[in-house]
Image (tube, rainbow, N blue to C red):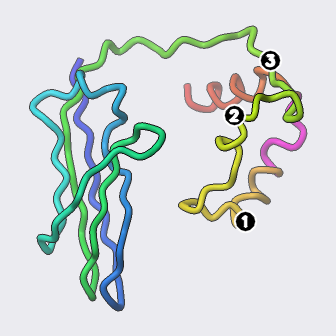
Amino acid sequence: MLIKTGFDITFSTEKATPMLIMLSIHPSRIDDIVDGEKIVAEPCVPIHFHHDSFGNFCGRLTAPAGGVRLWGSALVRDSGLLDAVELNAIQHPIEVLPDECLLYLMASRYCETDKLMDIAWSLFRDTPPGWARVAGDMHFCS
Protein backbone atom coordinates (compact mmCIF):
# COMPACT_ATOMS: atom_id res chain seq x y z
CA MET A 1 0.00 0.00 0.00
CA LEU A 2 1.05 3.61 -0.44
CA ILE A 3 0.70 6.15 2.38
CA LYS A 4 0.84 9.87 1.70
CA THR A 5 2.49 11.76 4.55
CA GLY A 6 2.81 15.47 5.08
CA PHE A 7 2.92 18.42 7.42
CA ASP A 8 2.38 22.17 7.33
CA ILE A 9 3.81 24.08 10.30
CA THR A 10 4.14 27.82 10.83
CA PHE A 11 6.48 29.41 13.38
CA SER A 12 6.22 33.08 14.35
CA THR A 13 9.44 34.79 15.38
CA GLU A 14 10.21 38.32 16.51
CA LYS A 15 13.76 38.20 15.17
CA ALA A 16 15.91 35.86 13.10
CA THR A 17 15.92 32.56 15.01
CA PRO A 18 18.19 29.54 14.45
CA MET A 19 16.20 26.30 14.35
CA LEU A 20 16.86 22.58 14.29
CA ILE A 21 14.06 20.59 12.68
CA MET A 22 13.37 16.87 12.74
CA LEU A 23 10.59 16.48 10.20
CA SER A 24 11.98 13.79 7.93
CA ILE A 25 10.78 10.22 7.68
CA HIS A 26 12.89 7.92 9.85
CA PRO A 27 16.05 6.71 8.07
CA SER A 28 15.00 3.07 8.55
CA ARG A 29 12.22 3.72 6.00
CA ILE A 30 14.37 5.53 3.41
CA ASP A 31 14.04 2.68 0.89
CA ASP A 32 10.24 2.84 1.19
CA ILE A 33 9.97 6.47 0.08
CA VAL A 34 8.58 6.72 -3.45
CA ASP A 35 9.96 9.60 -5.55
CA GLY A 36 11.76 11.29 -2.64
CA GLU A 37 10.72 13.39 0.30
CA LYS A 38 10.11 17.13 0.02
CA ILE A 39 10.67 19.68 2.80
CA VAL A 40 10.17 23.36 1.91
CA ALA A 41 10.64 26.60 3.84
CA GLU A 42 8.64 29.75 3.00
CA PRO A 43 10.04 32.30 2.67
CA CYS A 44 12.81 30.42 0.94
CA VAL A 45 15.65 30.04 3.42
CA PRO A 46 18.41 27.48 3.06
CA ILE A 47 18.04 24.28 5.10
CA HIS A 48 21.24 22.38 5.83
CA PHE A 49 20.47 18.69 6.37
CA HIS A 50 22.61 16.37 8.47
CA HIS A 51 22.39 13.18 10.54
CA ASP A 52 22.42 13.47 14.33
CA SER A 53 24.21 11.07 16.68
CA PHE A 54 21.16 8.75 16.60
CA GLY A 55 21.13 8.57 12.80
CA ASN A 56 18.06 10.81 12.44
CA PHE A 57 17.92 13.14 9.44
CA CYS A 58 17.75 16.71 10.79
CA GLY A 59 17.57 20.17 9.24
CA ARG A 60 19.20 23.38 10.37
CA LEU A 61 17.96 26.79 9.30
CA THR A 62 17.52 30.36 10.46
CA ALA A 63 13.91 31.48 10.49
CA PRO A 64 13.71 35.14 9.45
CA ALA A 65 12.11 37.83 11.60
CA GLY A 66 8.36 37.37 11.25
CA GLY A 67 8.55 33.60 10.99
CA VAL A 68 8.70 30.71 8.62
CA ARG A 69 6.32 28.12 7.21
CA LEU A 70 7.68 24.59 6.85
CA TRP A 71 5.79 22.08 4.80
CA GLY A 72 6.58 18.75 3.30
CA SER A 73 5.23 15.58 1.82
CA ALA A 74 6.23 12.11 0.77
CA LEU A 75 4.70 8.93 -0.54
CA VAL A 76 5.73 5.85 1.46
CA ARG A 77 5.38 2.21 0.46
CA ASP A 78 4.20 0.05 3.38
CA SER A 79 3.14 -3.59 3.75
CA GLY A 80 0.18 -2.64 5.93
CA LEU A 81 1.15 -5.33 8.44
CA LEU A 82 1.09 -4.53 12.15
CA ASP A 83 4.38 -4.03 13.95
CA ALA A 84 5.64 -7.05 15.85
CA VAL A 85 4.76 -7.06 19.56
CA GLU A 86 6.82 -8.88 22.19
CA LEU A 87 4.16 -9.99 24.66
CA ASN A 88 6.76 -11.49 27.01
CA ALA A 89 8.81 -8.31 27.30
CA ILE A 90 9.45 -7.18 30.84
CA GLN A 91 10.13 -3.77 32.33
CA HIS A 92 13.54 -3.73 33.95
CA PRO A 93 14.25 -1.55 36.97
CA ILE A 94 16.26 1.54 36.03
CA GLU A 95 19.16 0.54 38.26
CA VAL A 96 19.88 -2.60 36.19
CA LEU A 97 19.78 -0.91 32.77
CA PRO A 98 23.09 -0.66 30.90
CA ASP A 99 24.65 2.81 30.85
CA GLU A 100 24.10 3.00 27.07
CA CYS A 101 20.31 3.08 27.66
CA LEU A 102 20.25 6.00 30.06
CA LEU A 103 20.42 8.75 27.44
CA TYR A 104 17.05 7.56 26.10
CA LEU A 105 15.49 8.21 29.51
CA MET A 106 16.60 11.84 29.75
CA ALA A 107 14.13 14.65 29.30
CA SER A 108 14.15 16.16 25.84
CA ARG A 109 14.93 19.80 25.31
CA TYR A 110 12.37 19.66 22.46
CA CYS A 111 9.51 18.58 24.73
CA GLU A 112 8.18 20.54 27.68
CA THR A 113 8.43 17.62 30.10
CA ASP A 114 7.61 19.78 33.11
CA LYS A 115 4.19 20.50 31.57
CA LEU A 116 3.56 16.87 30.58
CA MET A 117 4.71 15.17 33.79
CA ASP A 118 1.41 15.60 35.69
CA ILE A 119 -0.67 14.13 32.89
CA ALA A 120 1.80 11.25 32.43
CA TRP A 121 1.58 10.38 36.12
CA SER A 122 -2.22 10.66 36.11
CA LEU A 123 -2.43 8.28 33.14
CA PHE A 124 0.21 5.72 34.13
CA ARG A 125 0.74 5.92 37.93
CA ASP A 126 -1.35 2.83 38.67
CA THR A 127 -0.38 0.83 35.60
CA PRO A 128 1.30 -2.42 36.65
CA PRO A 129 4.90 -2.80 35.52
CA GLY A 130 5.69 -4.88 32.48
CA TRP A 131 4.21 -5.14 29.01
CA ALA A 132 0.77 -3.98 30.21
CA ARG A 133 1.90 -0.38 29.71
CA VAL A 134 2.54 -1.03 26.03
CA ALA A 135 -0.51 -3.21 25.64
CA GLY A 136 -2.63 -0.49 27.23
CA ASP A 137 -1.37 2.05 24.70
CA MET A 138 -2.06 -0.37 21.87
CA HIS A 139 -5.61 -0.89 23.13
CA PHE A 140 -6.36 2.83 22.87
CA CYS A 141 -5.01 2.93 19.32
CA SER A 142 -7.02 0.03 17.93
Q: Which of 34 and 105 is in front in this view?
A: 105
Badge 2 density bin: few <14, some 14–19, many ≥20, Cα 10 Å? few
Quarter of the picture containing the N terminus is top left
Q: Mark 1 points at which residue?
A: 114
Q: Check disc 1 and give the amino acid type.
A: Asp
Total marks placed: 3
Instruction: Indicate the secondary structure of the residue bearing disc 2.
Output: helix
Name which quarter of the figure residue 37 lies in. Answer: top left
Name which quarter of the figure residue 67 lies in. Answer: bottom left
Which numbered disc flags the more N-terminal residue, 1 or 3? 3
Is residue 101 depicted above or below 12 in this figure?
A: above
Question: Could you say where residue 13 lies in the image, as x and y percent from the top left?
Answer: 35, 84
Disc 3/disc 2 C-alpha distance (Å): 15 Å
Verify whether residue 21 appears in magenta. no
Which numbered disc flags the more N-terminal residue, 1 or 2? 2
The residue stretch that appears in magenta = 122-128
Instruction: Indicate the secondary structure of the residue bearing disc 1.
Output: helix
Quarter of the picture containing the C terminus is top right
Badge 1 density bin: few <14, some 14–19, many ≥20, Cα 10 Å? few
Q: Mark 3 points at which residue?
A: 90
Name which quarter of the figure residue 46 lies in. Answer: bottom left
Q: Which residue is drawn at 25% across and 63% down?
A: 70
Q: Residue at x 38, y 62 (%)?
A: 20
Q: Which of marks 1 and 2 is in front?
A: 2
Q: Which mark is residue 81?
A: none
Q: Which of marks 3 and 2 is in front?
A: 2
Q: Which residue is drawn at 21% across and 61% down?
A: 47
Is residue 17 depicted above or below 32 in this figure?
A: below
Disc 1/disc 3 C-alpha distance (Å): 27 Å
Q: Which mark is residue 101?
A: 2
Q: Which of 24 and 60 is in front in this view?
A: 60
